[in-house]
Image: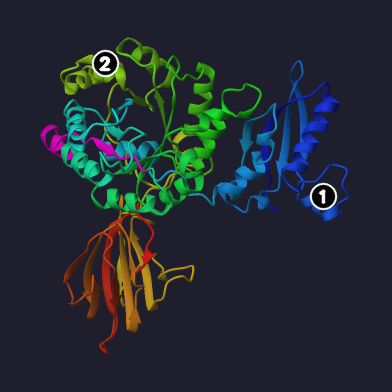
Amino acid sequence: MYAPIVVTYELTGKDAADAYKAAKEIAYEQTVELPVDFQLNEEITNRIIGAIRQITPINEGRYAAEIAYATEITGWQLPQLLNVLYGNISIKTNIKITGIEFPLQFLDTFRGPNYGIEGIRALLGVYGRPLLATALKPMGASPSEFAATASAFALGGGDIVKDDHGLVDHSFCGFKERVLKCLEAVERATDKTGKRCLYIPNVLAGVDAIERQVEFAVSHGAAGILIAPYLVGLDMSRYLAANYPIVVMAHPALTGTNFHDCRHGITPSVLLGTIFRLAGADVSIYPNVGGRFSFGSDECTRLNNALRGCLGGLRPSFPAPAGGMSLNNIADMAARYGPDTIYLIGGALHGQDKKDLSVGTRVFMDKIRGLFIERKPAANPLSTASSCDLNAGNCTSPAAPEIHLSFSKDYRWDGVTPMVYKTGGEFDFMNITRHELIGKNFGGTDFDVRYFQIDEGGYSSLEKHVHVHVIICVRGTGTLICDGSSYTLRPFDIAYVPPLYIHQLANDGTEGPFGFFCIVNHLRDKPLKG
C-alpha cells in the first residue's frame, strides 16, 4: 500500500458541516464520479474514494479541506494526476487548490529537471549571482535580425537569450533558419568574449512536428528549449525533458485562467512550481511583482520556494520572474529573490541603449555584479544529488566519488558488476553486457564511460538518438553499422557516431568477445528504434 497524495482545497461553506459536505462531494466527484449517497462496495469506498483528513476554517465562509487520494489512481502519470486533482471540479466554482503533498514513491517515477539550478550554472560557469536573460522580439523580424539581437546580448555578457514564446515556424521567419542563425551568432560572440551564453529556441507546434523541432535544435547545438506546457500539454513537456538532454524553460501561457479568481483555480506555487517541476521544467517563468501581469510578493515567494525547495530527488529549478523590472529596482529584486534566480528582462534592457543592446546588457550585468559576488564552480555540479542534498541541512550528503577503478582479468573492474545491456524489451539485441565505469556510479562527471562486451554471434540494438557516441575498441574484432555503411573495428580503433545516425555494433566472428569503451554525455536522450 502506497502513501497517499494529499491535496489541500480552499472551498466555500456556510459552516464546518457544510464545508465537510462540499469536500465529500469533491472526494466522490474526482474518483468514482457518483453521488455521495450512492451505495458502493467496501473495497471501492476504502481504496478509491478520497479520504477527508481535516476541515479547517480560514475566514468567514471559507475553509481548507485536506483530501487524501490513493496514489495508484493517478496511474503514475501527469494527465491522470491533474484529472484526479482538478478534472471535473475545475468546471465548478469556488474551489481552489492551494497545496499538494506527494509520497516519495510517486515522485520517484518522475525524472523532473535535467539540469536544475546547479546544472545550468555548470553550463554557463556562473555561480553566486542571478542570471540575466532576455527574449528575442518582435514577431515579424527576420532570422538575421534576431541573430543580430542575440549576438549583441551575448557580447554584452548576458547569460540566456530565448525566443519570444510567440515565435514559431512562421512563413516569414522559419524555425530552422532562425535557430541556425541565432546559434551561430551566439557562438561567435562567445568566442570573442570567452563567456558562454545560451540560446534557447521556442518549440510550439503540433504533436507530429514538435519532437522534430527539438531534434533539430539539439542536434545543431542548442542547450535547451522554451516550451509552454499548458499549450502543448504537460506530459509532452515531461516526455521531451525525459528523452532529450535539454534545459527546459517553461512559459506560463494559458495558465492565467487558474490565477485570476482568488476563490477558484490552482495557485501559482502548485502549478508553475511543483507541477511544472514534475513536468521537467529547469526554469519556470512567471509574472514578476509590478509588471503588466503581476503576482503579489507573497505568491512569488511561495512559488520560488516550490521551485527551489526539497521535492524528493528532483533537482531544484530556477525561478524566472519577468516584467516590472528596471535598473532602478534590481536591488529590490536581489533582496526579494536572492541569487538563485533568473531575471528575464525585455523592454527595460532593450531600451537602456536603443542603438546597441550590448551596451544596455553590460549596464544591467554591472548592476547585478555590484550586488552579488561571483564564485568558483562547485565540485561535481552535474552530479545526481537530489534537491534535498542541495538545499536541506537535515538530508544526507552524497558520498565522496571513487577515484580509482582497478582492472581485473577477463575485462572486469573491481566493484563494477556487469549489467543487462537494456531493459524494457522494446529493442532487439543478443549476447551483450554493459559495465558502467565513470559517470553514473563513479566520478560525478557530466559524461559517462561505459564498457560493452559482445560475445560471438551477438549484437547491439539498431537505434538512433541525438547524443553522439565515441567508441574505442579494446578487445577482439567487431563491426559497426552506421548510416548504412559497415566498418571493422580492431583494438584501439576509434569511431564516432553523429546525431540521429542509425547504428548497430555486432560480433559476427569466431575469435572471442568484442569489447569497446563507449563515451557519451551523462544527460542524454533515450534511443529510438532505427
Q: Indicate left or right for 355 with 465 as reference.
A: left
Residue 103 shows in this picture: no
Whether residue 197 appears in magenta in the rendering, the answer is: yes
Q: Nearer the viewer, mark 1 or mark 2?
A: 1
Determine contact: label 1, label 2, CB under 8 Å.
no
Helix, strand or loop under label 1: helix
Type of amino acid under label 2: Lys
- State whether residue 371 is above or below residue 468: above
Q: Quadrant of residue 183?
A: top left
Choose between 389 and 333: the one closer to the eye. Answer: 333
Q: Which residue is mark 1?
A: 45
Residue 183 shows in this picture: yes
In the displayed orientation, state which residue is furthest to the front. 171
Residue name at image x 62 percent, y 21 percent: 262
Q: What crowding class fits label 1: few (fewer than 14 Cα within 10 Å), some (14-19), or many (20 or more)?
A: some
Magenta residues (range): 187-203
Helix, strand or loop under label 2: helix
Image quarter in which the N terminus is found: bottom right
- Marks 1 and 2, the one that precedes in the sequence: 1
Q: Indicate left or right for 495 with 414 as reference.
A: left
Q: Quadrant of residue 123?
A: top left
Whether residue 359 appears in magenta in the rendering, the answer is: no
Residue at mark 1 to residue at mark 2: CA–CA distance: 60 Å
Identify the image's colour scheme: rainbow, by chain, secondary structure or one colour: rainbow
- State whether residue 219 is above or below residue 190: below
Type of amino acid under label 1: Thr
- State whether residue 389 is above or below residue 258: below
- In the image, residue 122 lies at what x, y percent? 30, 39
Image quarter in which the C terminus is found: bottom left
Q: Which residue is mark 2?
A: 367
Residue name at image x 36 percent, y 56 percent: 525
